Amino acid sequence: MSNNQTINKNNLKEAILKAIAFFDMFDYPLTPFEIWTFCGIKCELNEILEALNDNSLPLKAKYGFYFLSSRSEIVDIRQRRYNYANRKFKRALKIARLFKLIPWIKMIAVGNSIGANNLRNGSDIDFFIITEAKRIWVTRWFCVGIAKFLNLRPQPLKKRDTICLSFYITADNLELKKLMLPFNKTHDVYFMYWLANLVPIYSKDNAYLKLINVNAWLKEYLPNWRPFYSGHTRDAGPPFSFFYRDFIDMIIGGADSLLKKIQLRIMPDVLHRRMNVDTRVVVNDKILKLYVNDRREEFREKYVLKLRQIKL
């Protein structure tokens, strides 16, 4: 074996541990295929399987899931959460089918940084929405209005199965790398995995594939990753006709600027204070990212600490 081969195998082992360490923060053990998908180094699946058989790695396996040696309990946690996720996706699909009535929506995805089947029982459901250009404010107005009417907006004491509507972008502004945190010890790993784990449940005019194509930089970090394709059980179905879109747009589409003024006026003070200070709260005519409690920096620090604990 050459020295170069040894270095490559060591790099692969390190990449495997880094992926498992990140998802460990969310009690999410990985299958070999998921390790291959998220390991951050170009390789074949059989190379991952071979590396996982190396007893020098501080890993254990149970029911086909791999995890850090002292964390066997997270396998049961992941299996329990699979049932929660099914319930939440049924709720998400019902709401997405209502949101299809809003003709300027190009895509609705469930956003969750740690996998489509790892939703906590008490958590809300994060929607990431792509709108038509110059229609972001009117789209948000109706999304929030429908959610409020159905009592589905998250409250401090009520989050379970509610709908979080805090992230919109327009179809002419799909590049998301600008929203990543600046490099500090490591990359914005949370954002990378969030994007990779988006689950599109409604996509019009190939909006999801356009999003992925514009953000091809993601493959630099996750070269084995592939776009997500929803099965029919997690698809809100086709859009309404172009005639319907044009008819509704003729009536109220031009109200976008007016609804912008109204929404800015009634926006909570905490959002006003943090608006466009950094990438946590971004408000303009192409992006509405309204995460007051953006925990990416916290997760990055925890990730760096965990890497130190496993001597990486």
Image: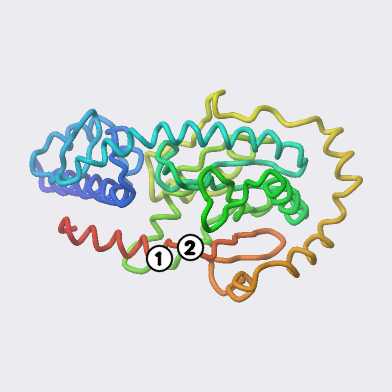
**Where does the image place residue 306, in percent across and percent down from the top left?**
23, 58
Give the color scheme: rainbow, by chain, secondary structure or one colour.
rainbow
Q: Secondary structure at mark 1?
A: helix
Residue visible at 44% across and 68% down?
182
Name the disc covering residue 223, or none: none
Quadrant including the N terminus = top left
Residue 216 shown left or right of residue 252 in the figure: left
Residue 96 shown left or right of residue 42 in the figure: right
Which residue is nearer to you in this view: 246 or 98?
98
Circle 2 sits on which residue? 294
Label 2 crowd (10 A; few <14 / some 14-19 / many >=20): few
Residue visible at 73% across and 31% down?
239
Residue 263 lies, with reference to residue 127, above or below; the image says: below
Which residue is nearer to you in this view: 47 or 135?
135
Circle 1 sits on which residue? 297
**Where does the image place residue 293, in percent across and percent down from the top left?**
49, 64
Q: Are marks 1 and 2 in contact (CB under 8 Å)?
A: yes
Q: Secondary structure at mark 2?
A: loop
Label 1 crowd (10 A; few <14 / some 14-19 / many >=20): some
Residue visible at 38% across and 46% down?
222
In the image, farthest residue toward the front: 157
Residue 187 lies, with reference to residue 153, above or below; the image says: below
Which residue is nearer to you in this view: 305 or 11?
305
Disc 1 residue type?
Answer: Glu
Residue 89 shown left or right of residue 182 in the figure: right
Residue visible at 28% across and 32% down?
45
Disc 2 residue type?
Answer: Asp
**Where does the image place residue 266, in percent across and percent down from the top left?**
73, 67
Distance from the alpha carbon under mark 1 to that under mark 2: 8 Å
